[in-house]
Image: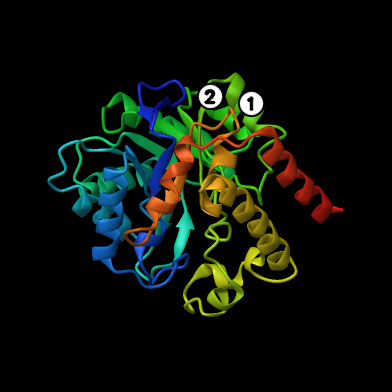
Amino acid sequence: MKARQLGNSDLHITPIGFGAWAIGGSGWEFAWGAQDDRDSIAAIREALDAGVNWIDTAAVYGLGHSEEVVARALEGVRDRPYVFTKCSMVWNEHRTIGHSLKALSIRRECEASLRRLKVDAIDLYQIHWPNPDHDIEEGWSTMAALQREGKVRNIGVSNFNVAQMNRAEAIAPITSLQPRYSLLHREVEPEILPFVTRENIGVITYSPMASGLLTGAMTRARIAALPADDWRREHEDFREPQLSRHLKLVGLLRAIGDRYGRTPAEVAVAWALGNPAVTGAIVGARRPGQMLGVSGAADFRLGPRERAEIEGLLARQAA
C-alpha cells in the first residue's frame, strides 16, 4: 500500500487503517455484540501482515477494552503501526456514557489511554465528538498542551463541522478530521471536505462500508439474527424502507466488483478513497479473513463508468 501524508503531520499512513470499534466487545451502549479477544488479536495481526500501518481506536470502545486488546495485539511486533485513539466520551461507575471536554477530564483520559495502550505517546489523539459545544475551546487548548508536553504527537478532531474547526484552528492547527463518509452518508461533501482540503487537514473516514451494510455479507436474515446488544439492530439504515435501497446498491457494487475480481466491500471503500480530500479509510474487522476481503481497495480505482453507474442508481433512488 502506498502511504499518504496525513495533513500537516509527519505521519505517512496507508490508505486503509484497522478500525477497533467492534473489538471492544459487549456490555456497553454502542457494542457490536460479543467478541472473542483471540479473534481480535488475530485480525489485527493479519491487517499488519497485509501492510496496514495504523490502528484507530477510542477509550470508549468497550469502555477501555478495545485499547487493551490493541496493546496485547502489538506485543512483540517489531514494526509497530501508528496508534490513534480518541477522548471526550466518558463513563461512570454505572457504565453510563457522557461527554466532557473539560481540561481535567481530557488529561485523565489521556493518562488512562497511555496506560492501556502501553505507549509513551499517542501518535494521533482526537476529540471524539464536539460535545459540549461551549467547551470546544477548553478541550482543544488541552489537546494542544498535551502535544507540547509530548504525551501525544499529533492532534485531530472527529465529527466537527466547519465552524467548530475554525474555532479550534484559532488555538492550534488541526492535523486531521475523522468524519463519517460512505456511499450512504455523504453529508460532508458540500462544505466540510472542501474546507479541510483548503486548510491542509487530513481526513480519515469512518464507516466507509456503512457499518457492514456495503460489504456484501449483510443480508436480511443476518440482520434479523444480530445480537440483542448490537447497536445496528435499531439503526434506520438496517430497517425498511432504507434497507431495500441499500441492498440494491450492494447488488450494483457486487456487479462492478465481479468485473475486476473485487468484493463489494473493496468497491465501497475504493469509492470513498477516490475522493481527493480523503487520506485514509478506517476498516473494521472482528476475525481473521475479513481484512483480506477489503485490503485490495487500497490499490483499486473506480473509473468514470463505474462512478456514473453508482451515481445513476443513487439518483434514481433519491427521486
Front position in the image: 132 or 116 = 116
Looking at the picture, does residue 178 appear above or below residue 171? below
Label 2: state its secondary structure. Answer: helix
Residue 194's x, y, as percent? 66, 26
Label 1: state its secondary structure. Answer: helix
Residue 233's x, y, as percent? 57, 73
118 vs 197, left or right, is left
The residue that mark 2 highlights is 169
The residue at 60%/32% (across/down) is 275
The residue that mark 1 highlights is 195
Front position in the image: 136 or 156 = 156
Front position in the image: 287 or 150 = 287
Which quadrant of the view contains residue 155? top left
The residue at 32%/42% (across/down) is 107
167 vs 54, left or right, is right
Q: Amino acid at mark 1?
A: Phe
Query: Separation of disc 2 and disc 1 at Cα?
Result: 12 Å
Q: Amino acid at mark 2?
A: Glu
Residue 120's x, y, as percent? 19, 36
Which quadrant of the view contains residue 219? bottom right
Looking at the picture, does residue 140 appear above or below residue 55? above
Q: Nearer the viewer, mark 2 or mark 1?
A: 1
**Crowding at mark 1 (Cα within 10 Å: few <14, some 14-19, many 20+):** some
